[in-house]
Image (tube, rainbow, N blue to C red):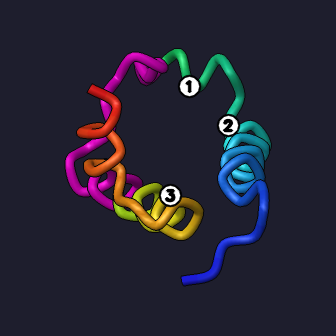
Amino acid sequence: MQFEPGWLMKTCRAAHISSMMQNSPSLIRSVGLNADTPVPDDEAEELFALMNSRFRAWTGRSLAEQMQRST
């Protein structure tokens, strides 16, 4: 898997713009969504896999290995 510099920022920005174009702030509030709602487990696992892959490409270590070294 290849990542270009700034891929996460660009992906999040594109998702935010798309969401704002398709939904008004009042609609989002009316369905009770907020930033404190955790993502579902499958989406969290997908995000972790992407972040772990990118971190390994940068450092040669997994996120878990880095956490062990930081403690």
Residue type pointed to by label 2: Asn
For residue 26, what is the image quadrant? top right
For the record, the magenta segment spans 31-48
Tell me: 35 left or right of 27: left
Q: Which residue is mark 2?
A: 23
Q: Is residue 34 above or below residue 16?
A: above
* Label whose residue precedes the other's in the sequence (3 or 1): 1
Mark 3 crowdedness (10 Å alpha carbons): few <14, some 14-19, many ≥20: some
Residue type pointed to by label 3: Phe
Mark 1 crowdedness (10 Å alpha carbons): few <14, some 14-19, many ≥20: few
Q: Which residue is mark 1?
A: 28
Tell whether position 38 is magenta.
yes
Residue 12 x, y percent position in the rendering: 67, 46
Q: Name the mark on residue 16.
A: none
Residue 5 x, y percent position in the rendering: 78, 61
Q: Which residue is mark 3?
A: 55
SS for tag 1? helix
Q: Residue furthest bottom?
A: 1
Q: Is residue 20 above or below residue 8?
A: above
Q: Is residue 66 above or below residue 55?
A: above
The Cα atoms of the two marked residues, 2 and 1, are separated by: 7 Å
Q: Assess whether mark 1 and mark 2 are in contact (beta carbons under 8 angstroms).
A: yes
The Cα atoms of the two marked residues, 3 and 2, are separated by: 33 Å
Tell me: 9 left or right of 65: right
Mark 2 crowdedness (10 Å alpha carbons): few <14, some 14-19, many ≥20: few
